[in-house]
Amino acid sequence: MLLSSVPTTSLDDVLERLAWYARRWTIESWHRVLKSGCRIEARQFGNLERFVRATALFAVISWRILYATLLARIDTDLSCEVLLQPVEWQALYCHSHHTRYPPKKPPPLQQAVLWIAMLGAYLNRKHDRPPGPTVIWRGFLILHEITKMYQIFRQNE
C-alpha cells in the first residue's frame, strides 16, 4: 500500500503516483553520494554563503557519479566521451592497461565506468552486481589524481 497526500481517483492517477515513488530510489542514491561520498554533513563551512557554494558544487559532483552509474548500465554502446574529457579517458586507459599510448578511438562508456569502479576497489568477479555509486565515487577520486599525473608526464611530448 502506498499512501499519498495527493488526491488519487483514477487508474492514471495511481500509475503516476507509482512512477513518482519509483523515482525515489534514484533520488535516495543521489543523496547517499552527496552525504557519504562528498561528506557534506561532516564539513564545517563557517557561514551560509560557503555552505550554499559548496553544496552547489557537491550536487554537481554527486550528479556526475550517479549519471555515470546509471548511464553505463542503460546504453552499452555510448562513447565514454559523453562523460569523460579526452585527457581523463586517455589517462584511465593508460593506467588500466599499463601502457603509455591510448587508442585513437575512445572506449565504450560501460568499459570506462568499469575501469573507474575497479580503481575504487570493485572486484569485477563473474557474479558481482554492476558497480554502484560508492566504488565509482572512490574511483573518480583516484582517476582525478591519475589524470593530473598523466598531464604532467605528457606535457613535454
Image (cartoon, rainbow, N blue to C red):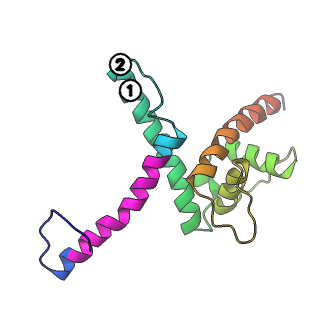
Question: Is residue 85 among what the camera can see?
Answer: no
**Would residue 59 be found to the left or right of residue 78 on screen?**
left
Q: Is residue 69 magenta?
A: no
Q: Is residue 28 magenta?
A: yes
Q: How many marks?
A: 2
- Identify the main secondary structure in magenta: helix
Q: Secondary structure at mark 2?
A: loop
Q: Nearer the viewer, residue 101 or 91?
A: 91
Q: Nearer the viewer, residue 1 or 137?
A: 1
Instruction: Tell me where residue 37 appears, x and y as whole percent.
Output: 54, 41
What mark, if any, has residue 94 been given in the picture?
A: none
Q: Secondary structure at mark 1?
A: helix
Quadrant in which the N terminus is drawn: bottom left
Q: Residues under labels 1 and 2: Cα distance?
A: 6 Å
Residue 75: which quarter of the image?
bottom right
- As drawn, which residue projects farthest toward the front? 1
Quadrant in which the C terminus is drawn: top right
- What's the residue at 40%, 28% (across, down)? 53
Tell me where the magenta segment starts and ends, as one range.
Answer: 14-32
Amino acid marked by disc 2: Asn
- What's the residue at 56%, 57% (across, down)? 69
What mark, if any, has residue 51 been given in the picture?
A: 1
Question: Is residue 76 among what the camera can see?
Answer: yes
Q: Are marks 1 and 2 in contact (CB under 8 Å)?
A: yes
Amino acid marked by disc 1: Phe
Q: Nearer the viewer, residue 70 or 87?
A: 70
What mark, if any, has residue 47 been given in the picture?
A: 2
Q: Nearer the viewer, residue 24 or 97?
A: 24
Residue 53 lies, with reference to residue 29, above or below; the image says: above
Instruction: Tell me where residue 144 appears, x and y as whole percent.
Output: 67, 37
- What's the residue at 36%, 67% (across, down)? 22
